[in-house]
Amino acid sequence: MPCKTLHFKSPYFLLFGPAPDITHLRFPLPVDPDFQPKSLRVVLPLPPVNLHPMTTRSKNGISKRKAFSASTSIDLSTIEPSSFKAASQSPEWQSAMREEIGALHAQGTWDLVPLPAHKNLVGCKWVYRIKKNADGSIARHKARLVAKGFSQEEGMDYYETFSSVVKPTTVRLVLALVAQFLWSLRQLDVKNAFLHGVLQEEVYMTQPHGFENKHYPSDFVCRLKKSFYGLKQTPRAWNERFTSFLPSLGFQASNADPSLFIHHLSLGQLTYFLGLQILYQSTGLFVSQTKYIKELLDRVDLQDSKPCPTPCLPYHRLLKDDGKPYSHPEQYRSIVGALQYLTFTRPDIAFSVNQACQFMHNPMESHVVAVKRIIRFVSGFIVYLGSSPLSWASEKQHTVSHSSIEAEYRALAIAAAELAWIRQLFCDLHVPLHVPPLIHCDNQFADILTKGLSIPLFQHHCSNLMLGSSKHESEGASKDIKGPNSATCQKIEEESC
């Protein structure tokens, strides 16, 4: 480098003198004299060509119009937030969370303690739901603190989980009797019902997000004392607490349905119950699930779809490996589960829903198409009380029949068992049956087997019709499954309440 000793000149300058000037030099590139710029062609990549044989919406020019909103602000009080951060920006949801925390503290749901060694810690999260009236208007905002029950360990923080559930036939029977005898129908809503159950197991949960107690160390957790939403044993704990308390008020449990308790008590008039809309008319009650259907259509984004005349295609059978696997099987299970509850008032879709339920574990895209047809349509046997349907079934039998006669005969046996159960339900409700129940069947040979036949004659008919029947089965059939004019109906009439 130049320095004072070299008189501020570089060693190269002292040895070789000043550098030569090369600015006048040019280095031309070789050019083809025959080159013509106009002969150039621009080559662009070809778009991918769809060659598969499947018929799609895009091939047929079918497209769904996208809805765009010009507004940049969203009213958080009209939507259900998916996170605590979004909910904390709305005064309505903040108030709902404070109300939930207040109810939890009032019930003495937990104590704050250090987490013992070798104990499982269950997480929790906030779930937000907008409760609506039957007409679709907002009734209230509900914030629910839910435990992450999927992180529980069997044998450590839960054991038994079974809890009885009311049969839909029981609800329909009570509603039919109310319409028949013009009874007064009332309802009672228990607020934060699950929090009244008492936990028998030792369960530890993290503190709720946004409401950590500042007076305790940050590593303290909630030791649950009451049953909590999301835990696997919560329904059982609440059911035990509730069913043990009702007899002290004079309620008597039904022998036919353990979820039914009978007592004369004046409550609020029933208008909306478990998704059922109750409309009072001069001729009786009209039970529907209109609001439930609308919410289901909105949920699957089919509210503007074209309705179908039938719930399934005629002569079309769903197969196990029909097409490609569906990419969201959990969504399929959720929708089919919602359709199962819709059969509460819609027996006309029972068969189609039962077909869709057979592919819950691995649904295909063709199964999803069939489910969507059922939803578009909603824009075994049936048991009636007068003109009111109480119970029905349309499902695959558990055994393979050798003939249509055997299949009809087994269906009659199932219907007879359902009638016997309904009869017991009438007895528990202290409603006498003055007329024996009548079973209708459109198969003449199956109807013959329901008559009061002797065992040899019954076995003779079974052998002629190629029906496998042992002596034990014959005795059961001759005693329990009878035609409308048989001795069994007389016995039912004599023993009716």
Image (cartoon, grey):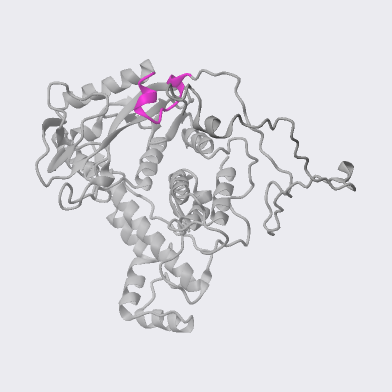
Whether 80 is among the magenta residues is yes
Residue 332: percent from left, percent from top: 48, 49
Report the span colored magenta: 75-89
Residue 455: which quarter of the image?
A: bottom left
Q: Is residue 102 above or below residue 341?
A: above
- Residue 259, visible in the rendered structure: no
Residue 338 drawn above or below residue 9: below
Place of residue 336 in the rendered image (x, y in percent of width and height, measured from the top left): 47, 49
Tell me if I can see residue 425 in this picture.
yes
Q: Is residue 88 above or below residue 205?
A: above
Say whether residue 36 is left or right of residue 29: right
Residue drawn 40% across the image and 26% down it: 130
Q: Where in the figure is residue 199, as x and y percent of width and height?
A: 14, 40
Q: Position of residue 55 (x, y in %)?
A: 69, 54
**Could you say which is closer to the camera, residue 246 or residue 66?**
66
Give the residue at x 21% y 31%: 207
* Image quadrant where residue 377 sits: top right
Which quadrant of the structure image shows residue 103? top left
At 54% from the left and 19% from the top, the residue drawn is 72
Count of all numbered marks drawn on residues in the image: 0
Closer to the camera in the image, 222 or 291: 222
Closer to us: 403 or 233: 233
Residue furthest to the top in view is 91
